[in-house]
Amino acid sequence: MGNEEGIARWQAIQAISTQNTPFSSLPFARALARHCNKKATLWLVADNTRDLASLVTFHRKQGPFLRVEVPPFTPFTSVLCAQPEVANDALASLANHLADKFDDIRLHLHPGMQDIRSFKWANWQTGPFYTYELDLSTYDVSQQGWSTGTRRNFKKNKDLYKINRSASDLEQIVALCAAGYNRNKRQFPLAQTQLLNLAGDLLTQNMVRCFTAVDATKGTIEAGVAVLHDGTKGYYWIAGSNPGPAMTVLLGNMLPALQAEGIQTFDFVGANTPGIAEFKRRFGAILTPYFAVTHTPNPLLATMLRIKRLLSA
């Protein structure tokens, strides 16, 4: 993925970048490459005196084409800028360099990266996505920021579940997540063993906290969340539940626990599907946009993808 000098330079940018997340960390990149069959490459943008930006791409070969992808369970690509005042020049240089090296590129930018003119000026396609973020530093544990119905649902059902925190529940959390995809007739983007091994690696790095809601009568795990975190920000990373109130009860207990342990912001990781977005909205979080930027510099592949979109319309 990079030599020792390159990794050290990347980590120096990471230490000061406001776009830093667990998804831009060395442990995450290495675990993803190891367990999900992804080729990882580290890129650095520098001027004559300093490093300006960095990126880790995950790419694969598809026939004769080399394509940069956003891996599953990775909401944000690790585009990091050292300082805001150099961002436009750094991103322009990065966009041009990637276009020279790859046939197709897709990046999901950090929500803090709202100025995407550099990509537009380089003729990339851009479009918004959304997530919900909750400020835990001011979170009211009395749940006054929740919707009335969600608050009522929690109070009515909170005694039906016990809340557990055990790394041994990770496999069940992954299984609940996969079951949710199946119920919605969506293909699970990884083999369950791949996701379990990825999360297990990060668990050993103290980057994952596991929470489950257990039916107090049956003893079965009805909801679970593996929270990926970097110490101050937590992510609703791997999550799933059986139909019913278990996830609401779990979140009602999990959010105050994360707050007490120093997590200042909680990201619900995506608000782009109507039912899921509405569920997350009801916990008082703030809708936050972020951007996907894409480019297909290879004209043959661009034509093929355009025809594919027309045929599927």
Image (cartoon, helix red, strand yellow):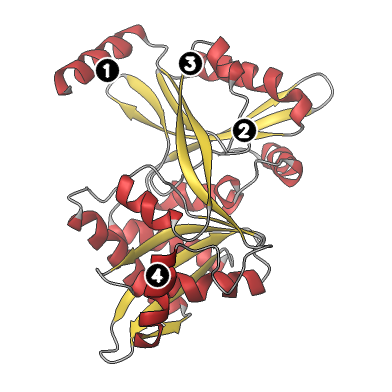
Where residue 304 sits in the image (x, y, percent)?
24, 14
Q: Nearer the viewer, mark 4 or mark 3?
A: 4
Residue 27, compared with residue 226, is above or below; it is above
Q: Nearer the viewer, mark 1 or mark 2?
A: 2
Mark 2 lies on residue: 113
Tag 4: residue type?
A: Thr
Where residue 92 sits in the image (x, y, percent)?
63, 16
Mark 1 lies on residue: 305
State whether residue 170 appears in this view: no
Q: Quadrant of the C terminus?
A: top left
Cα distance in 3D space between marks 2 and 4: 31 Å
Tag 1: residue type?
A: Leu
Cα distance in 3D space between marks 3 and 2: 16 Å
Where residue 197 sits in the image (x, y, percent)?
40, 62
Tag 3: residue type?
A: Trp
Q: Which mark is residue 248?
A: 4
Q: Which mark is residue 124?
A: 3
Q: Are marks 2 and 4 in contact (CB under 8 Å)?
A: no
Query: Which residue is at the far right?
Result: 49
